């Protein structure tokens, strides 16, 4: 029962947008940034944002990439990527 969310955290105004990338999109991002998956910051599967994405896409495996789009007063949008890990 702990995996059932009663509140969609992604709808909160202070939480940035989260997008699950396909394997092809992830490979393109890694190639563009010239990094490996292990060099990305991590996000745990237990993170509330990931739990919401799992309600949409189904189980998200370790090693998947998530694109996070933050709103910025100076840059309008700031995009970061996270590697999904267990936890």
Image (tube, rainbow, N blue to C red):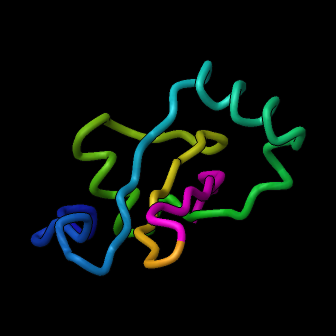
Q: Tell me the quarter of the image containing the C terminus.
A: bottom right
Residue plotted at (59% across, 39% down):
64
Residue plotted at (71% across, 26% down):
27
Residue farthest to the left, as pictured: 6
What's drawn in magenta, residue-wise? 75-87
Expressed as whole percent of the image width and height from the top left, the position of residue 65 reads 59, 43
Expressed as whole percent of the image width and height from the top left, the position of residue 20 reads 45, 40
Expressed as whole percent of the image width and height from the top left, the position of residue 56 reads 23, 40
Q: Is 87 situated above or below 73?
A: above
- Using residue 34 as the reference point, say whether residue 51 is left or right of it: left
Residue farthest to the top, as pictured: 24
* Corner quadrant of residue 8: bottom left
The dominant secondary structure in magenta is strand
Q: Is 34 situated above or below 80?
A: above
Residue plotted at (20% across, 75% down):
12
- In this rendered view, identify the residue nearer to me: 60 or 73: 73
- Using residue 13 as the reference point, say whether residue 45 is left or right of it: right
Q: Is residue 15 magenta?
A: no
- Using residue 69 as the reference point, say whether residue 41 is left or right of it: right
Expressed as whole percent of the image width and height from the top left, the position of residue 16 reads 37, 67
Q: Tell me the quarter of the image containing the N terminus.
A: bottom left
Residue plotted at (24% across, 71% down):
9
Q: Is 1 situated above or below 14?
A: above
């Amino acid at each position: 029962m702990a995996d059932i969310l009663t509140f969609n955290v992604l709808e909160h105004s202070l939480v940035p947008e989260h997008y699950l990338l396909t394997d092809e999109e992830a490979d393109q991002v890694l190639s563009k940034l010239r990094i490996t998956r292990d060099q990305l910051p991590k996000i745990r599967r237990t993170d509330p944002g990931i739990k919401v994405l799992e309600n949409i896409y189904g189980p998200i495996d370790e090693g998947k990439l998530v694109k996070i789009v933050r709103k910025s007063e100076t840059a309008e949008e700031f995009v970061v990527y996270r590697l999904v890990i267990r936890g």
